Amino acid sequence: MVTEILKNVWYAVALSSEVPVGKMKAFSLAGEPIVLARKKKGEVYAIKDICPHRGIPFSYGQMIDDEVECPYHGWKFNSEGVCTEIPSLYEGQDLDCKKIKVKNYPVIEKQGLIWAFLADKSQTVDLKQTPQPPTLPTLPMDAQPNLIEEALFPCHIDHAVIGLMDPAHGPYVHKSWFWRSSKSSYEKKKKFAPVPFGFQMVRHQPSKNSKAYKILGGQPTTEITFTVPGVRVEHIQIGSRNVYNLTVLSPLSEKETRVISMLYWDMPWLSLIKPVIEAFAHKFLYQDLEAVTKQQDGLKFDPSLMLIKDADTQAKWYYALKSEWQTHQSEKRVFHNPVQETELRWRS
Ligand code: FES
Ligand SMILES: [Fe+2]
């Protein structure tokens, strides 16, 4: 039950802090090697990390005056991916280096993450008509996360996404004294609604067996939004204060998915107990990692799998959204969200 990695969408490839000013770093996106480079004034760009001359990755080289210099023969490339200099050329030689180009990826930097657009060459798209990297409404655009947890899931992005959105694994995978045990499961009933390119568990008071929310005190309410290709935003409100948990999934290849989970808050006192929250967040994500890692032992045999109502309905929506994303593009029509407003019930 894995489907094609979506193209013509933005993926969060890196944390802003991973690419310092004047430096570049290698990443991977859907099997393509890319190098992210940051100019002196702070702007980030992304080009394919393979020199078109003889194939060495640019990321082994250095940045000179905002350009990438290949470590093998010193060819230089600018942020558009255009070659600007070939040092071995003699005066007056008939070779226009500007005609040599490597693929360049549109980049957006938002709230501490660098997003790259993975284009499908066979289609032209309006970048504005694609699912956008999320904005956290009550925080400034350049707000940096207060806490970051990340993990490399050894699986296809589909399994990583449906594993993280799955409401029924909680009591089994996330059991722990400070979280909950499988004995304390209750029937849950949650309202869902479509949002552009995704769906939302509408704002509600968290269940009584979700101890993590208790740390926040007050009367928290939460709203969870998922959008393709793999972006989950949970927005917790306590009075006028806010906590966001932004989880982004980015496919390094068919078999590896980078999961970055970030917390942002505007409650100064939360920073005092940051080590506690960090321990929570780390344990939680690594429990998921452990489950999908074990799952690979079974998936090797390519079994046929099941999605049941209502616990797996969100996973069904995920596949339906992906499929509609591809179909509307190939048919060159508007996107029709396959999700209907509804209520889902499950025990967890
Ligand atoms: S391989 Fe890059 S300049 Fe020759
Ligand atoms: Fe989980």
Image (tube, grey):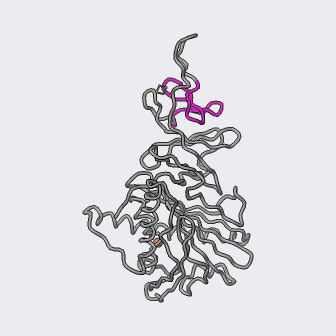
Where does the magenta region start and end? 59-84
Left or right: where 23 falls relative to 7: right
1 and 24: which is toward the camera? 1
Residue drawn at x 60%, y 68% is: 245
Q: Position of residue 65 (x, y in %)?
A: 66, 31
Q: Position of residue 235 (x, y in %)?
A: 63, 72
Q: Position of residue 339 (x, y in %)?
A: 49, 72
269 and 22: which is toward the camera? 22
Quarter of the picture containing the N terminus is bottom left
Residue drawn at x 69%, y 66% is: 137
201 and 186: which is toward the camera? 201
Q: Position of residue 331 (x, y in %)?
A: 44, 55
Q: Extreme left residue here? A: 301
115 shown above or below 97 = below
The image quadrant of residue 277 is: bottom right
Q: Is residue 192 magenta-colored? A: no
Residue drawn at x 50%, y 51% is: 8
Residue drawn at x 66%, y 64% is: 136
Q: Extreme top residue here? A: 91
115 shown above or below 222 = above
Q: How many numbered marks are there? A: 0
The image quadrant of residue 161 is: bottom left
